[in-house]
Amino acid sequence: MQTIWIKNPLAIYTGNTNDARGGVVIRGNKIVELVALNSSPLIYCDYSIDASHHVVTPGLINAHHHFYQTLTRAYPGALNKELFHWLKSLYPVWANLDDEMHSVATELALVELMRSGCTTASDHHYLLPAGLEHAIDIQVQTAQKLGVRTIFTRGSMSLGEDEGGLPPRHTIQQEQTIIDDSERLIRDYHQTDDGAMTQIALAPCSPFSVTKDLMKETAHIAKREGVMTHTHLCETIDEENFCIQRFGIRPVDYLEDVGWLNDRTWLAHGIHFNSEEILRLGKAGVGISHCPTSNMMLASGMCKNLELESAGVKVGLGVDGSASNDGSNMIAEVRMAMYLQRLQYGSAKVTHFDALRWATKGSAAAMGRRDIGELDVGLQADIAMFKLDDIRFSGSHDPLAALLLCGAQQADKVMIAGQWRVLDGEVVGVDMVQLLERHRAAAKRLAQLAN
């Protein structure tokens, strides 16, 4: 077990008040020492990495995504539409997903995320048409091959359009099938130990695509098995109107009614809350994944990050699906979050430190993780290192601020659980030419099947 000193970074963001300007020491999969400025480690190190040209941060944590949507970026039939119409145009396309499509879409999304400094990624996969019943198994195998930390949420849709829901019937599953598979996935893959590389959460898609019975049973299973729950909530006014018309209550009341208003829950988007609802969410310890680019692309609205945090809500960051982003670049998403929130609160109230917090410690807390999200002794050695040698950074003065203000796009090195997974900007062990050829062929075949 080697001991590594990431030495004398150009700048470092730890996510806490500790002085680590002299670097970080890693042994095995954990951080064992933070080195103060102009100091050397107290621990013997086998070798050091010169970080004097790097900005160092905790590994970025993506709290919401849909990996399969990398196959339908800039899809003509879905352009210039808001959420409900956008979904209805894409459901029939996604219904043709098969194993190879899903596998390559997952690999490409994870590679894109890792190259952008992401070390932990959560995916919300809710579309399991006939023939793709083992979608989550495929994703777990792909992630394990890449060595990336993942939280896969077993999504589901059970309320078809013929019963008042949004998805077409051929894209949904029977509820007992969903329940049985959810329990199987937890049993087969969910890790509970410190440093867990693979976790399972349960994630009925949204109030407009599942029944209340399924939401209640999911909450029951999650409590019994000790896993997190995840869903889309309060993304659009259309969703709010759907809840009022179908259930006679607003979305947060619906959340409480089905047993989800607790600290095992994190929500995607979380835009349309009133002040009283924000206080209730904070008191319950709910988490929110802010998805700024997707919210702008679909014109859904702005998440109230500062009010939510002030109330005690754990606010994280997600890139959302690559058909509503249309990318999987985590460091670019951090910049977008900072700017969108400044538009809401003013430039003096939202700093680059806020945005970095959302993308690291905030996402970790929202998803129930305490072992990642910061650089501190005893935590996992998940680290992103960015160079500022591109033309976009020339003339910059504050390296940490420049990372976001000048628009970093790619990490130079990424460590996950003490292992180098990205070196010189490329994911170790991945043939990018072959991956892109497979992915483009899968996207083309998916589009052909839909026509």
Image: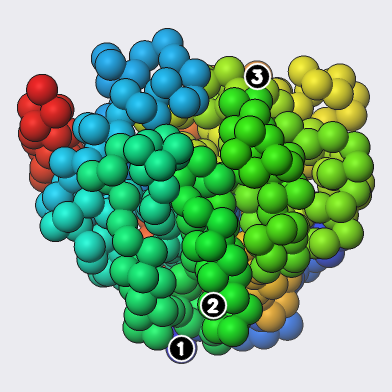
Residue drawn at point x = 10 percent, y = 22 percent: 451
Q: Amino acid at mark 3?
A: Gly
Asked whether 133 or 357 is in front, the reply is: 133
Q: Are marks 3 and 2 in contact (CB under 8 Å)?
A: no
Looking at the image, residue 382 sits to the left or right of residue 124; the answer is: right
Report helix, strand or loop for mark 1: loop
> Residue 60 placed where, x, y %?
57, 52
Pointer 3 or 1: first along the chain = 1
* Residue assigned mark 3: 395
Nearer the observer: mark 2 or 1; the answer is 2
Which of the numbered marks, if any, corresponds to residue 43? Answer: none
Q: Please say whether residue 434 is visible from this viewpoint.
A: yes
Looking at the image, residue 390 sits to the left or right of residue 272; the answer is: left
Q: Amino acid at mark 2?
A: Ile
Looking at the image, residue 214 sits to the left or right of residue 167; the answer is: right
Nearer the observer: mark 3 or 2; the answer is 2
Pointer 3 or 2: first along the chain = 2
Which of the numbered marks, if any, corresponds to residue 221? Answer: 2
Residue drawn at point x = 31 percent, y = 50 percent: 172
> In this picture, is 413 found above or below 380?
above
Report helix, strand or loop for mark 3: loop
> Residue 349 placed where, x, y %?
89, 29
Residue drawn at point x = 73 percent, y = 82 percent: 42
Q: Amino acid at mark 1?
A: Met
Q: Please say whether residue 366 is visible from this viewpoint.
A: no
> Residue 381 placed where, x, y %?
57, 70
Q: How crowded is the residue under tag 3: few (<14 C-alpha within 10 Å), some, or many (20+)?
A: few
Asked whether 134 or 379 is in front, the reply is: 134
Which of the numbered marks, if any, corresponds to residue 1? Answer: 1
Pointer 2 or 1: first along the chain = 1
